[in-house]
Structures are given as C-alpha cells and as structure tokens.
Amino acid sequence: MIHIGVICDLNWDNFILINNKFKKINSQIYCIDAIYSKTLEIINNCCLTNNLTLFRNYSDCLSKTVHNMLKICNLWLIFTNHCEYNTSSYLVISLCKKYNIKYIIISEHSRNYDYYSFEVDSKQTFKKHLNQIDKFYSTNILYSNQDEFKEYNDNFSKKAQVSLLIKPDIREKLKYMYSEIDKQKKDRSISLLYDKEELKKEKQVKKTIKAINQLTFSTNRRNYYKKYSC
C-alpha cells in the first residue's frame, strides 16, 4: 500500500472538497494517514464514504508526529486556505520542501487548480497524477527536539484545548434547549383534570363490585329454584 498523508487547516470544515479528492483514490493501492486533531472526524467520514483505509497518528507533540509520518507517506494532500500560520499544514509544507517529498495543496480559493510541488501535465487528471507516485521509505528524516518547532507545537496544543473546552459548552446548550422544548410541549398539551392512575383503580373497583353482584344474584337464583322445585 502507498501511504498518502492528509493534513488540513485547524478550522477546515469543507467535507465536499476532501471527499471529491478521496473518491478518485484507488482504495486497493493507497491508504490515508492523518493526525489526531480537530479535523480528524471529517477525514474519517470521507474515508468511510470511499472505502479508504485510515491510519491515525499521534505522539506527544505535533512536530514529532509529522516527522514520523514523513518517513512513510509518499505524497501529502494539504487542504489549506493560507489563512493560518504556524499550524500543522504549514509545518508539513516546510518539511516536505526540506526533504523533497511530493505534496499537493488544495484550497477553497482555487478549486479548479491545485498546486503540485512536482512537475505534472496540466491535461492529466488528479487520478493519473497519483500514478506518478513511487513507494519509498525515507531513512534520512530525523527528528530533533529543537526550538524551531516550538511555535507549531504550542499553537496546535492551544487549538486542541480550545476545541475541547467548546464541546462541553455546546452539550450543555443542547441539553438546555431540549429541556425547554419538552417543557413547551407539556405546557401546550391538554392538562387532565383527574389522576389517570386513580381513575384506573376506580374502574377496577366498579368492575369487581359488578362481578360480585352478578355472582351473588346467580347464587341466590339457583338456591331459590332448588328450594321450591322439591
């Protein structure tokens, strides 16, 4: 399998643009590698839609994760609108340039024209361009804990923390909204002027008394005929 690394802007939410690329990828030849991040859900859904195998990558910091992925990913698909700085997409672009790894930039600003870091024929389709990718394993990519990646790591961590803080807040809002809807439904519904359980009990008592009266009447009637038939 040929590994394709996929990275997005931290605020990327365009499912259609990712899916349009994924549906042109042969699931028998290629697989997708992505980072645990805010955009992983979109990438995962696109993979499921197109029967693509997805490998999720994680380590204690962004730059280390990217370095590990660079060793196995033969091509990168980078979804960016060039509006964020010191993020995962920019880190991948800079490292791909450094190690001469092929990448394609897909943007909402130029949907019909993608940027290729390697020479391609403009008449060929995206699917045919993938055929130019050779499988390899890079051994010259070494990770070192240098300060040059600190801003990328910090920025990525802060964004991840913000997204985690937002989710519980959204859940609380939804919980409140649903409770208000239930309350409004109850207020609009017809209020009963009696207790339903008490009414059931009362009906059962009446049925029991009626049954007893019928049994008593039948017994008395049978005894009467017995007495005067002799």
Image (tube, rainbow, N blue to C red):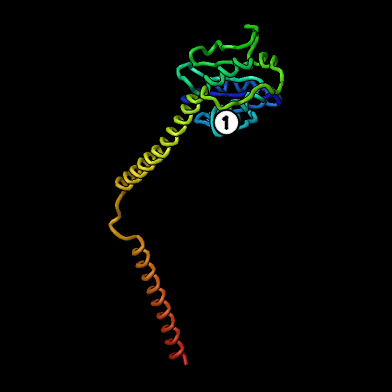
Where on the picture, by quarter, is residue 72? top right
Front-lying residue, 104 or 22 = 104
Above or below, comparing residue 46 to residue 117 in the picture? below
Q: Position of residue 79 (x, y in %)?
A: 53, 20
Where on the picture, by quarter, is residue 66? top right
Q: Residues within 10 Å of mark 1 (few under 14, many from 20)?
A: some
Q: Please, what is the three-letter code of the amino acid marked with disc 1? A: Asn
Q: Position of residue 167 (x, y in %)?
A: 43, 37
Front-lying residue, 53 or 150 = 150
Quadrant, the N terminus: top right
Q: Which residue is mark 1?
A: 44
Residue 13: tell me if it is visible: no
Q: Kindly identify the residue that appears in the image at 41 percent across and 36 percent down.
A: 165
Residue 162: tell me if it is visible: yes
Front-lying residue, 218 or 69 = 69
Q: Kindly identify the residue that appears in the image at 56 percent across and 29 percent down.
A: 35
Q: Kindly identify the residue that appears in the image at 60 percent across and 26 percent down.
A: 143
Left or right? Give the position of 197 relative to 151: left
Q: Position of residue 205 (x, y in %)?
A: 37, 71
Left or right? Give the position of 109 relative to 74: left
- Circle 1: element type: helix
Q: Position of residue 110 (x, y in %)?
A: 51, 12
Above or below, comparing residue 194 to residue 53 in the picture? below
Left or right? Give the position of 138 relative to 8: right
Q: Kindly identify the residue that appears in the image at 30 percent across and 49 percent down.
A: 190
Left or right? Give the position of 196 relative to 96: left
Tally of marks: 1
